[in-house]
Image (spheres, grey):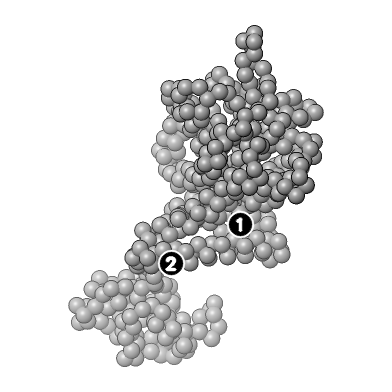
Amino acid sequence: MRLERCASHRVTTTKEHMSGSDDHTNDEIEVLQSDPLTPAANEADGPRGSSGGRRVTSGGGAPSGGRRGASRGSGDAKPRVVSPWSLLLAAAILVALLLGQWPIVIGILGLAALITVHEFGHFIAAKSFGMRVEKFYIGFPPAALRRTWGETEYGVGIIPLGGFCKIIGMTPEETMKVAGADGEMVDVPVTEDRAYYKQAVWKRNITIAAGPFMNFLAAAVIIVLFVGIAGIPKASLKLDQVVPGSPAAKAGLTAGATLVGADGHRWTTWDQASAYFRARPHQTIQLTYLPAGGIAGANGSAGANGAAAERTVAVTLVENPQAKGNGYLGVAAGVVREHPGPVRALGLGLLSFRDIVVGTFTGFWWLASGKISATGPDGAAGPVGIIKVSQQAVKQDWYPVLLAFLSFNLGLINLLPILPFDGGHIAVNLLEKVRGRRLSAVVFERMLAFGTVLLVLLFIFLTFNDVKKLFGG
């Protein structure tokens, strides 16, 4: 299935988390690793080892990395800062639009929005439990715009492929920078009661699970709004296409004609006409239609005003080459959109969301069982493949459906019980609850490193596969 292969996108893209220094220089922040909630490092002295936080670089305790500065004081609100990087971001968007690549821009921004929604789930849950959120970014740094309200720095990065939410004290080993007696900045442990690691296990797990939950909620909202606003596509009796050389073409029907009935029967829906044709292979029928340009009624059915222009012709149906035993006229139905009321739109939208859920699990099962090849045209996709499919969806007006599908997949894959995914951190917290004590820093670091290596290898594999398919390989 074409869409199911998009499910692996979350595994391979975005969600990179950054680190930056306290002096807020524009080039202070570097990409570190994929992870949905991991706090970003605050020092410009490079990545540190992990010992129990949400990422390879959070906290100290690693034998090779020293400790990481994690937090600065909340201080007073600082004025908004607009950096020169904002000009680069604006120029990149402008160039893409001038080159006619707006579908790609929409596709990238859509993915960024889904990841921002994910991070917002972590953010709002952490704030609700009184945890201290140091940074919340839309997009990855360098920052084009940032401003501090209260104790949290909010920013917009120039790389529109995700975002991050940095919560202080993800592990007991995490450190923060404070001014020493001589004025020099020194590392001290994060000990305040609002630190993440000091919260009850259930609070930590809710904070982490809030990210995937927001993606599930976003998927449902997107599809319900799409159904309510765009309407429900419905086949009409007005023909969109007539296959050259088909019985319909030989009888003189053209695109734009409206089917009325046959052999004295009159139709009001396309399903009635289609069933009539399928039941009569190799039979000659007296087909009544309204020529293109005639006046048709609702849903493409022939109206009373067009009755005088109706024509009846003899048409011999043939057997459908793609469905043996079925009659074939050789036409394609037009499409009209029915706009349901709010209540019905909600019901239909939720049914569509159910289809997305079923389709996602079906796609994963087909991949696991070998029914479809991971490297085939309907297999797994990485970032390049996702953008390509998004571009097609934007042009064909079904991008909201794809966006809902990707949102559900993003949430689902994040629940995998493997670090650095959200599910891995939930599993570690539950293990802590059962054991009555935390995992050692060394064990956690090794688990996180193992999962990160798998993630990087999968990213490389899927990106290579995307490029190969892009060039017809």
- Residue 445 or residue 200, whichever sits in front: 200
Q: What residue type is labelled 1?
A: Arg
Observer-side mark, 2 or 1, equals 2
In percent of the image, x 64 and y 58: which residue is there?
379
Left/right of residue 339 with respect to residue 362 in the rendered view: left
Residue picked out by circle 1: 5
Q: How far apart are marks 2 and 1 (CA)?
A: 25 Å
Name above or below for residue 93 compared with residue 25: below
Residue drawn at x 55%, y 31% is 134
Residue under the point 44% across and 31% down: 91
The local secondary structure at tag 2 comes to helix
Q: Residue at position x 45%, y 52% from top?
A: 394
Q: Position of residue 49 (x, y in %)?
A: 73, 31
Residue 382: tell me if it is visible: no
Query: Mark 2 highlights which residue?
Result: 348
In the rendered image, is residue 97 in sight? yes
